[in-house]
Image (cartoon, rainbow, N blue to C red):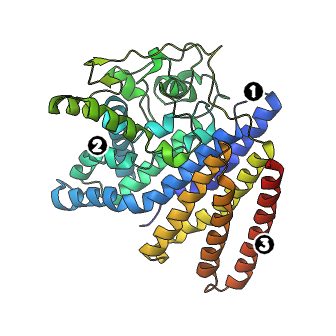
Amino acid sequence: MNFNPVMLAIPFFFLAMGIEIWIDRYQQTKLYRLNDSITNLSAGTSQQVVGIFLKVITLGFYEVIYTKFALFHVPHTWWSWIVAFFLYDLCYYVAHRMSHEVNLFWSGHVVHHQSEEYNLSVALRQSWFQGVWTAPAYIPMALLGFDTTQLIVVGGFNLIYQFWIHTELIDRMGPLEWFMNTPSHHRVHHGRNPKYIDKNHGGTFIIWDRMFGTFQAEEEKPVYGITTPINSWNPVWANFAHYEQIGLQLRDAPKLADKLKVLFYKPGWDAKMAVYHPIPVVDRTNYQKFDTPLVAQSVNWYVLFQYALMTMATFPFLQFQGLLTWPQKALIGVLIGATVVNFGWFFEGRAWAYRVEAARLVVSAGVAVWLLLPLAAGVWLSIGVGVALLISLIWLWRLSGSKQ
């Protein structure tokens, strides 16, 4: 069975975002900023690409545990899928909670919390490495005999459920608030207010938080983001920024025991001072979000156009990547990584972004034509690539001219 519900849901994710953006514009609620949203989506796109390589490790690890050490072998029946879904959500709660309470594991989850907005695009802002750190939390499922297919399917539906709760347009949901994870509960989880830190870790159900003492109801409106903002639109750097912080902390830790505390204590531990830094109090009325307002709006529209082209290329790549060789996958992965990095440089007003972009366009078009020509409609697809390249180069030339 080769079924990943997340891939089928991607078009509906974008449709839902479109509806939320329309409502946002109609109500003038200002939930979206283009630079933030594209960075969120770029993080998600690059995570899907990196996942092609890392899932060999994470799913391979699960398969080995299941094959070698499973106590039972659970059949694919209606009841086993229900049990698998509940068990997965409990394992997810443990993994998610540890991702907040262990500094090393936080490095694999922090990306999802970096946005200072709260909308459906934030749901797709995913970390490259989270699966590596959370893989051990699902060992109980493997030991009980739920195979890798069951893990992938119920995990996919769990992730799909969590998409819609990343919104401010839905308030409280009555009786559902008692046992389901809802937008209100998850807004708390994304808040950086001291009372909201490390609360509401559930995926689909909020019952685990109520049972294990990590539940917090939404009271004042949250301030979103992390306590130490990265102040960057670079989705690749977003995945490595916390590792740099850990490296600096390890350098300052005098003894091995202190270094272990840096890795496995909660985020915020200062090995040099042997104390936790207090969580800073924030006030929504005067909190200043990171922004780069001096970047021309025309640059933002260019990046949006390029993101649309990248998405049109990435989706079939993710669908049919099994037909490609590993070197081909790696080459495409590097190009997608370079693309999203340059998006960030454009948003940050970096002067070199224009030169890098010209080179990226030419190389990407060349690789696309090389891969497309052998296909049945390869000639027409290659012509389409050439037209997109020409439009992009002319647009880029005009942007660089207006900048001077």
Quadrant in the picture for residue 216? top left
Where 174 falls versus 373 (above or below)? above
Name which of mark 1 and mark 3 comes first in the sequence: 1
Q: Are marks 2 and 1 in contact (CB under 8 Å)?
A: no
- Residue 339 drawn at (x, y percent): 60, 58
Task: Please state which of residues 371 and 377 is positioned toward the viewer in this rendering.
Answer: 371
Q: Mark 1 is on which residue type?
A: Thr
Let me know if residue 79 appears in the view.
no
- Residue 95 drawn at (x, y percent): 34, 38
Which residue reaches farthest front? 404
Let me know if residue 22 appears in the view.
yes
Q: Secondary structure at mark 2?
A: helix
Q: Secondary structure at mark 3?
A: helix
Left or right, residue 146 beside residue 118? left
What residue did someone put label 2 on? 137
Name which of mark 2 and mark 1 comes first in the sequence: 1
Q: Mark 2 is on which residue type?
A: Ala
User: Which quadrant of the rendered structure holds the N terminus?
Assistant: bottom left
What residue did someone put label 3 on? 387
- Residue 209 drawn at (x, y percent): 38, 25
Where 38 falls versus 189 (above or below)? below
- Residue 395 drawn at (x, y percent): 80, 59
Where 137 falls versus 189 (above or below)? below
